[in-house]
Image (tube, coloured by chain):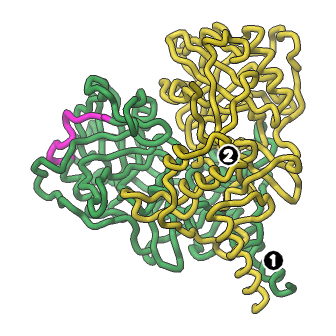
Chain colours: A yellow, B green
């Protein structure tokens, strides 16, 4: 009992250190305590202030060659940052589809409330653009070893550990040495049929509701919406099973989808995301976990991975 | 070390028991283990099958006197079950507002993406209907002791413990003996100004995005949408700060709001919710935490409280 108590004390001290401003320590489990309890931090920085004061080196530019721009026929566009480091073959497919004009004239055909908006072209029966791999391997997780991980510092109900790497929300398992992208709001994945099919990337979906984390490790996640999510989340819900629209007349037509790098420089939007390996990111997490100011009387002292929306800003 | 290991082994056995079908044990923390790990259950029941096979006594009828029916001018209605056991004075206010016709002719004036849809009438400067308490106490939590709680059985990033009581999603603290409603998708709360104001209930919001659990214990939660959430979640997002609509012309007009018990019996909709104290509910949670079947190759072995949508069905 004495030794157990000492072990638990040590563990809770680790948590205290971790929860205030998680250092880069991929191995420390915040729930490695008996009955984890939230530890509210009063006077934590306001998340918006943290962003406003972030130094230039806290941001990284989104590579225009990993930035997908989807334009709707009725106006408006959605920008999606791709994640080649997590699903290289599926992302290469997505880029090949974009360059071939695959999605031009396609549509959003499924919007399921509190779940996903899905678009694209059926790809099983049609000829694929050159360079598209018809059946990529299941790129559902990747080695943890070469990722610089910031542990979130709070328990998770799906993964042994969660945090951020290269500014992406991840789940990871230090024991197995694997990491994976999580289905947080705005994340984009590849529609697929039953295994062994993993989807080519010809049909994509974005998360528009409470994070369906049970999809993690079951599907290829290839990116996230960095601008225009409301053009997906505010669409009428489909009334058929799984949120499919009943009539083609209800589909939301897509004019075209291009890589930013293929757009004229003058038209090309540019974005920056907050670096998860910068101290500013840790301050942002602490602020999200301890909302205070005038409105919040009781800071939570904890935060869900998917309630830490990775800050994005548009470049002039 | 030996004793610590034994303690942790005991704790993990407890988790195993808890995760498969959580019994009514409010005190056992599933994250009372060193580095909690998901424990996938293969062949878990399909959640939809569990609901389809639920016996009659697994359901409870929603009290028509605790059921708010909001009708929009452009058609469609939203049904909201009230939670008098958690915020009695605020709920009594809401019922008094409804009976006085307070919201008839009001509107949704704020829709913030991935957050809330909010409606009602400003109440600070106007005369309130009789029976409305202008400044109720902060009904943000309540005693745990007289609730029959089903522990979820998985870690949470906000509360020491989470689970369900009287078919409501709750956070709770066995040490403090307190329990509170959580801001899951579809939950309805009371708009307020800065403390000590708690809001009268004249302005309400519904959660339409990833659960903003940091609002827990900071605001009065008075119910949940049991039908028609898509009539709130699919509205155009407001372009002003916090998602307020820029022009009144963008407001979504509300024709009227009534208690079901005040509607003619023939018009009155009726609902049932799955009883959280029935074994069927435990099977549903296990199924949600271990999605399998043809599509899911890797059951999660865990689930977020807010990814266990409490089953509701309409009565004939």
Residue A135 appears in which quarter of the rendering?
top right
Percent of width and height locating residue A191: 73, 27
Q: CA distance from mark 1 to mark 2?
A: 27 Å
Q: Which residues are magenta?
A: B98-109
In the rendered image of this protein, does residue B47 appear above or below residue A268?
A: below
Q: Would residue A261 be found to the left or right of residue B217 on screen?
A: right
State the residue position of label 2: A213
Q: Which structural element holds mark 1?
A: helix
In the rendered image of this protein, does residue B181 appear above or below residue A135?
A: below
Badge 1 and badge 2 both on one subunit: no
- Is A292 within the magenta? no
Per the rendering, the mark at residue B9 is 1
Residue B3 appears in which quarter of the rendering?
bottom right
The answer, for residue B153, to whether it is visible in the render is: no
- Is B100 within the magenta? yes
> Could you tell me which residue is drawn at 78 percent across and 27 percent down?
A193
């Amino acid at each position: 009992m004495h030794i157990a108590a000492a072990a638990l004390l040590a563990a809770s001290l680790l948590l205290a250190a971790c929860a205030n401003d998680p250092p880069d320590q991929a191995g420390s489990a915040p729930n490695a305590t008996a009955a984890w309890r939230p530890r509210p931090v009063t006077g934590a920085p306001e998340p918006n202030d943290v962003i406003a004061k972030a130094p230039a080196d806290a941001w990284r530019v989104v590579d225009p060659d990993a930035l997908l721009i989807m334009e709707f026929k009725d106006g408006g566009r959605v920008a999606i940052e791709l994640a080649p480091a997590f699903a290289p073959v599926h992302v290469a497919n997505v880029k090949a589809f974009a360059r071939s004009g695959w999605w031009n004239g396609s549509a959003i055909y499924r919007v399921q409330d509190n779940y996903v908006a899905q678009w694209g072209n059926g790809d099983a029966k049609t000829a694929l653009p050159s360079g598209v791999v018809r059946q990529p391997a299941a790129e559902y997780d990747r080695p943890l070893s070469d990722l610089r991980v910031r542990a979130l510092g709070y328990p998770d109900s799906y993964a042994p550990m969660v945090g951020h790497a290269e500014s992406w929300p991840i789940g990871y398992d230090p024991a197995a040495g694997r990491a994976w992208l999580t289905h947080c709001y705005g994340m984009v994945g590849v529609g697929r049929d039953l295994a062994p099919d993993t989807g080519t990337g010809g049909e994509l979906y974005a998360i528009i509701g409470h994070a369906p984390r049970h999809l993690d490790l079951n599907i290829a996640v290839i990116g996230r919406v960095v601008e225009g999510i409301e053009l997906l989340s505010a669409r009428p819900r489909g009334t058929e099973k799984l949120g499919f629209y009943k009539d083609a007349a209800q589909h939301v037509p897509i004019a075209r989808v291009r890589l930013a790098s293929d757009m004229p420089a003058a038209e090309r939007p540019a974005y920056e995301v907050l670096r998860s390996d910068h101290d500013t990111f840790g301050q942002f997490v602490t602020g999200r976990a301890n909302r205070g100011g005038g409105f919040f009387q009781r800071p939570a002292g904890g935060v869900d991975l998917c309630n830490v929306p990775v800050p994005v800003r548009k470049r002039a």
